[in-house]
Image: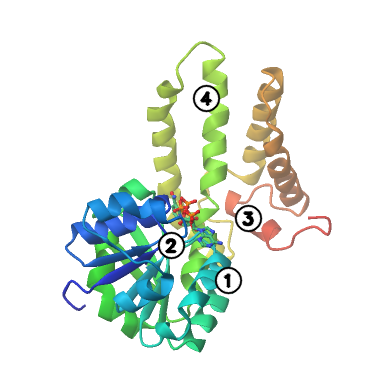
Amino acid sequence: MAGNDHTPVTVIGLGSMGSALAEAFIGAGHTTTVWNRTAGKAGSLVDKGAVAAPTVREAVTASPLVVVCLSTYDATIHTLEHAGAELAGHTLVTLNTGTPDGARRMAGWASGHGARFLDGAIKNVPIAVGKPDTLLYYSGDKAVFDEHEATLRVLGGDTVHLGEQPDLAALYEMAVGGVLLPSLLAFFQGTTYVTARGLQADTLVRYTAKWLEMIISALPHLAKQIDTRDYTGPIGATVGIFEEVLAEQRHYGRQEHVDVSWQAPIHHILNRAIAEGHRDHSISALVEMLRKPEQSA
Ligand SMILES: NC(=O)c1ccc[n+]([C@@H]2O[C@H](COP(=O)([O-])OP(=O)(O)OC[C@H]3O[C@@H](n4cnc5c(N)ncnc54)[C@H](OP(=O)(O)O)[C@@H]3O)[C@@H](O)[C@H]2O)c1
């Protein structure tokens, strides 16, 4: 890993996340050039020491390392088209959320313009940028990652290179990111039950956190079952038990006039698994259902 030699950095895209990235680079002593479509968003960063480039082209030419955090790959390509040939020889790092095919398209576009390329994903919120535990993963040319690792580590101490294939960060982003919304929705559903009884949502936090810790502790065992496709070992609750509990939960939700409709497709998957002989198997057997969607899905 190269030491942090305070490589000058350009940050393009100053939304919530891009502004946090720029601020972290400024705070770590990097000469930081910024550009945003809506130019006014650069103001507070300039007050903290950033240099606002008047054009994308000038933003790109200002630094060997160009970090882009726009909403999508399409917005990124559209914006960087204005920098044209200036990208040649620069390292381009994209940190937007997107799909693996989007990342491959982005990588092709970058190499077509002579840029060295890494795609990355930030697994946290803007306020966590720069903290020692904050996870960012990257994929693409390992030599490029090694060269800039110390600088990229400014954005989060848990900085990982997943592999040479440029779409791996987006792949893991899709694979890991999907956990978020169902988990939150389940928490929100729980809060409707307690608040309807005049209790504070806050009272659920400690117990939900403990439950999430249990889930975390089960993940390695479930992953092993999935990797071996053996769902018969020491298994905790079975598919059958999960089905019975979910039936109770849906009944309670309807009784309380809470919209629990999001649980219906989950119940359907459980019932499909039971119909295919997985009643006494580990809940990880549901992955077999996900691997073969129904025609209508
Ligand atoms: N915020 C988070 O908690 C978080 C966490 C992890 C990952 N991310 C990812 O980080 C990326 C940025 O998120 P954000 O929260 O910073 O979003 P945001 O606050 O909505 O900012 C979006 C940025 O993209 C720019 N933009 C959008 N369309 C554009 C276009 N066609 N041409 C040029 N610029 C365009 C916006 O420019 P204007 O200011 O001119 O509109 C702005 O700089 C997203 O892919 C998001 O999924 C965000």
| CA distance for labels 3 and 1 | 31 Å
Q: Which residue is mark 2?
A: 69
Percent x, y for residue 59? 36, 71
Find numbered disc 1 in the image and state the secondary structure of the residue it sits on: helix
- Please indicate, yes or no, whether residue 12 appears anywhere in the rendered image: yes
Percent x, y for residue 87? 41, 82
Marks 4, 2: nearer the viewer: 2
Mark 2 in CB contact with mark 1 (< 8 angstroms):
no
| CA distance for labels 4 and 2 | 34 Å
- Give the residue drawn at x 39%, y 35%: 210
Mark closer to the chain start, 3 or 1: 1
The residue most toward the front is 54
Q: Which residue is mark 1?
A: 102
- Give the residue drawn at x 32%, y 69%: 10
Render colour scheme: rainbow
Classify 10 Å Cα crowding around label 4: few (below 14), some (14-19), many (20 and above).
some
Horizontal arrangement in the rendering, residue 141 relative to residue 231 (left or right): left
Percent x, y for residue 156? 28, 59
Q: Which residue is mark 3?
A: 285
Mark closer to the chain start, 3 or 4: 4
Horizontal arrangement in the rendering, residue 127 relative to residue 292 (left or right): left
Mark closer to the chain start, 1 or 4: 1
Q: Is mark 2 within 8 Å of ligand 1?
A: yes
Horizontal arrangement in the rendering, residue 276 relative to residue 101 (left or right): right
| CA distance for labels 3 and 4 | 29 Å
Type of amino acid under label 2? Cys
| CA distance for labels 2 and 1 | 14 Å
Type of amino acid under label 4? Thr
Find numbered disc 2 in the image and state the secondary structure of the residue it sits on: loop
